[in-house]
Amino acid sequence: MIEQYTITTTPKYNFPQPSIDTTLPQRFLEQSLHSLKQVQHQPFQLNQQFQQFHISEQHPSNLQLKRQPITLKPDHQETTIAAVDTSTIKIGETSTGIIIAIRGATTWKQNRRYRYTRLGPFIFHITEDNKNEVYNTLEKSYFNTLYSSNRHATPHLMQMPTRLASLLERWLQTMLAKTVDHGLILFDGSLTSGTIDTPVQRMKDILSLARRNKSTVLAFSKMTSLRVNGYLITDQLPKHEPPYLLETTGVQFKPPTVVLGGVYVARLNKASYAFRLDIDREIPLQHRMAAVEKLLGNDLYMQSYPETLRLSHILCTFTANEVLAIKHFITRKHGIQIINRPDMHKLLFGPFGKGEIHS
Amino acid sequence: MKLYKKEGNILQVLSFPHENAEKGDYLLIEDPDAHKALIAQVIDVQFASIPGVLEELLRTLPDGGEPIQGEDIDPLEIAPHITYIQDASLLICKTRATLENEALSPSSSWLPSRSQSTIKKLSVPMLLKLAKVDGQRPIIVGGTKDSSLLTIDATAVDGTLNIVTGKKGCGKSHLSKLLMASLIGYKATVVIFDLNGEYTNIGLTKDGKRNMYYDKIHALTPSQNFKVALDQLHLNVVMGILIHALHLPATSSREFRRLWKNLKEKGCLTLQEMGAAIRDLKCNQHVRDALSSRYHALVNSGFFTDNPAEATLLDESLLKARDQGGAIVINLRNTSTIDRQIVVEYVLGKLVDSLQSWKLKATFLFAEEAHLYLRETYWDDIVTRMRHFGIFTTFITNQPDTIRESIYRQADNIFLFNFTNEHDLDVVSRAARVDAETVRSIARDLPPQHCLTLGKVVRDFPIVARVRALDMKTMGETRLFFKNIN
């Protein structure tokens, strides 16, 4: 998961600035500081393995991939392209919880120049005691509580990094949808909703906002598990000159999971990579193709992936240097002492102890 | 600062930006459990190898050139911490000594604790105090980076062989003038071979008024106010001139010696008599021709005179300098190569004579670009024989390879200015009192007027100082064509 907020909370932003609600980032900051105060002057254990959380995708049984490619022709009509991504990382553990960092980035290409805005990092100390408070406060601060069905209101502690990052990502997507006119908005991932962190209505609202501003949402998945005849859809590329799309049919999941986009396989240049591309289903087919053609005519491609989205990802990702800086920050500003608890995998298995994620 | 590594006598210390350590600084690495401390000098500053820095830099250059424009909203203000970590540096240090019970020893065989040791900068005054670089006759060389003064003791220059070297225009002559002025301030006798005539007016201030050294500077210009009568000369000195400066063959030398003794016995040792004697000499034609050509070389130099009144200045100057301290500046400007060698032969011979007969106690000799006038055999003479007579030489050069390696090996003090040429640095790093890494690393980055002082005067703790200004008419500046042209 990667995300970034697209619109700054200050009027300096180069983007169109309709009334943007800055409540969420403010709440992020408040909750961040509040949660860190609770852990002040405690020792904490550095994270020994970076953990990633995967949400297993369901496999629709009647998925089909049309073999006939939809040929694309780049349209160079000047179009704003915006992308959003967020990133999260576990910094370490305390005796009562975990310390995480979250950051979002939006990138846009306008007048042939890339610009970006990054929001964060926000640092949280999440415990079993405060996780509901942190999550619900943030959710309520911007998104209508209508969306947060109570059955998801108590995420597991280890799911909190992705849940909070997802919350920030949806907020940034909303801001982009509100502010970009006649543009293309690129999301990282799919338009699948009805999952724990993406209620259907929330995603529908984002898409609807974008449509109202004559913008089109294109969601690129770096990885997919959708398979046809046992093979990944992105591995079944015909011998055809790119750029082209392959259309899929029958992408349906068990409720409440809903795919709000038409699902395609996109091969945008000669690089032998293809990606799952979801395009807002409510947009007429012809406009969808036009949107992809505008993307082709206005953005750069490295390995068939849009540069704007790649930049968003790169800009929000935490480097090792930043992790060190965050540790420095929490040590200096909040008096949290770093302790070295032995890594049990390494301790027990020596060179064969590869860490928790491999266990 | 944190101790990171130790390999041999090289320490690696991790330093953060606010700690502001630079090349040449001294660090005190104290191990509280061992009750001792290492004194190390920073000889290089590198970026610390911080994980993720490359990614951090790369992501700001997505278009392969122009940095991407953007804005960072960083409400927790993490960015300063990121740059703080990114700008961390690794100090490569050379251990210089161990401090134990307030006494210094050159040992660095022990290993201070990496986790418990505290590292702090050691100020130059504190270092000098620990190293006991003090004395009754201070010479203020200049200011150090921490705004203190680098003061050496004049007695540490006494009896030593010194080298002042660096590339052109970085302040070598200035420092040698400072040393010279300080020495005559302590009533020392100083003799200067002044190749460019830049020491002749150091008795004047920059605006042309007399300064405190005015009465102690004796500028002697050969064939003008510096002439010699033959009867003042020792035969050895004359033979030195003829053999070494004028390359007189051995047979002719023997004939000249005989001729000289005859004239001396007759009490008519003058140029005129000598010319007549050579003319009338009954000997091999080749010998006569050889003597005749050398005689005319001596006459044409204008350095020799038959008028005793003209030929008293060097003795007078040496006497004055002996009593009150002073500098005899031998102005070799506008002097031909041969004449220069004649003058130098004479002065060195005269000095050895005066020292042997205890007319002089000792003298400090400052020789600029000595390879231009010093004969081959004098190099070893100067560092061995003449040193025992009491001639303590300071060589000043911008071509370090013109000074013999044996001189570097025996040099007691080196005042090193900036060099960027590897070859020059290699030559200087052969000096016995310094390690090559220090010379190469620190000298390369010395700004103009900054000098790395090495050797006995700083008790082998290399110290960088900006050489202080002098109110003297130096005349060492290069004459420029475009200066003052609109």
Image: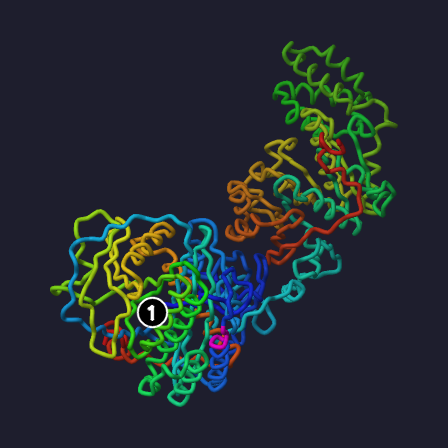
Name the residue located 37 percent from the left edge and 69 percent from the top edge: A208
Q: Residue furthest bottom?
A: A129
**Viewer can see residue A73:** yes
- Give coordinates of residue B84: x percent, y percent: 52, 66
Q: Main secondary structure of the magenta part?
A: helix
Q: How is the image coloured?
A: rainbow
Residue B256, relative to residue A321: is it above or below? above
- Give coordinates of residue B367: x percent, y percent: 68, 38
Q: Amino acid at mark 1?
A: Met
Q: Quadrant of residue B42?
A: bottom right
Which secondary structure lies at badge 1?
Answer: loop
Q: Quadrant of residue A214?
A: bottom left
Name the residue located 26 percent from the left edge and 70 percent from the top edge: A259
**Viewer can see residue A95:** no
Q: Is residue A24 magenta?
A: yes
Quadrant assignment for the C terminus of chain B: top right
Q: Residue furthest left?
A: A229
The answer to whether B463 appears left or right of B110 in the picture is right
- Give coordinates of residue A29: x percent, y percent: 49, 77
The answer to whether B145 appears left or right of A132 in the picture is right
Q: Alpha-carbon neighbours of circle 1 within 10 Å: few (<14), some, or many (≥20)?
A: some
Nearer to us in this view, B331 or A121: A121
Residue B107, relative to residue B427: is it above or below? below
- Give coordinates of residue A245: x percent, y percent: 24, 55
Nearer to us in this view, A229 or B10: A229
The chain under label 1 reads A
Residue corresponding to mark 1: A1
Nearer to us in this view, A268 or A144: A144
Q: Which residues are magenta?
A: A21-25
